Amino acid sequence: MNRRDFIKFGLSSLIFAGLPKNSLSQALPVLSIAEGKDHAAITINAINAVGGIERFVKKGDVVVVKPNIGWDRKPEYAANTNPIVVKTIVDACINVGAKKVKVFDNSCNDPRRCYQSSGINSALKGIKGVELKYMEDERYKNIRLNGVALKEWELYDEALSANVLINVPVAKHHSLTRLTLALKNMMGIMGGNRGYIHRNIEESLSDINKAVKSHLVIIDATRILLNHGPQGGSLSDVKVLDRVIASTDIVAADAYATTLFNLKPQDIPTTVTAYRRNLGEINLNKIKIIKT
């Protein structure tokens, strides 16, 4: 090593020595986008690009897969998460040895109709080790959040106790927040009067997502709802994109998904607030984007 390289090495060592462990990888979150007509294949490709399901799920784990199953709508209307995407994630978890995979959502319409119309009930039928659950009132626990907007709230205990939580929203328009993506999908583990949080929804969603971490975010953008969300109801409002997005950074995932609607991440107050509160990265030029 010559003198010039020695000095360069020494300066680098001093800089890196002062950084917290893993700060280099944390400084550049990874996000993958997979595209194709085979929605099962692109789901696996997106997961593999961020380390594979085995990075997140270990043998014996109890996993919660949290899709959007909020509406009594068929899959083609893009109001709920694509059942093929959900099934593929569940299968992947089971294949690497998950003890149990629990799938649920606090639906807005009647849950039995939502689970059936969405196609998720049929997609998961007969898979050993999976529970597609209707959420039970007695399973909500009052949790101290000490948040900005929410000091406490009732959250579903099976989401809290799981070893791994995989957040699987569909990307769609929302009449209040402009878009509903991964940050807002966590409303589906909340009990109580969820309408209350609409008065300060940006801070409330950050409070919930600070309390309950999504270990992996997989955004279904196989078809997106452009207008009249979150319920939709007209195929004219749906755009087929055949894409799946994956990241461990919930803000990065929401930020990129925003661009699919010809918007900027900074246009969405829920994303901006989550970034301000250090829940993830909003700046696309500071995210490592992998396309497959």
Image: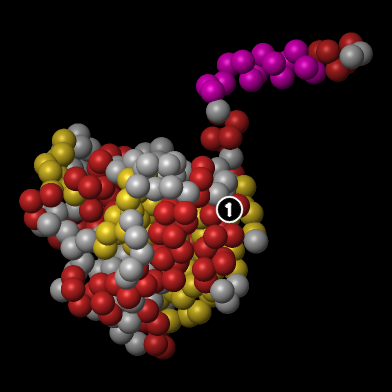
User: Start and end of the magenta stretch?
Assistant: 8-21
State the predominant SS element of the stretch in magenta.
helix
When the figure is inspected, residue 210 is found, relative to residue 94, above or below; the finding is: above
- The quadrant in which residue 45 appears is bottom right
Q: Horizontal placement of 87 versus 158: left or right? A: right
- Which one is in front, 50 or 183? 50
- The reply to whether residue 146 is visible in this rendering is yes
- Which one is in front, 29 or 216? 216
Q: Residues within 10 Å of mark 1 (few under 14, many from 20)?
A: some
Q: Secondary structure at mark 1?
A: helix
Can you identify the residue that label 1 sits on?
48
**Residue at 60% across, 72% down:** 36
Across and down, in percent, residue 170 comes to 39, 67
Across and down, in percent, residue 63 comes to 35, 48
- Find out whether residue 34 is within the magenta segment: no
Q: Amino acid at mark 1?
A: Asn
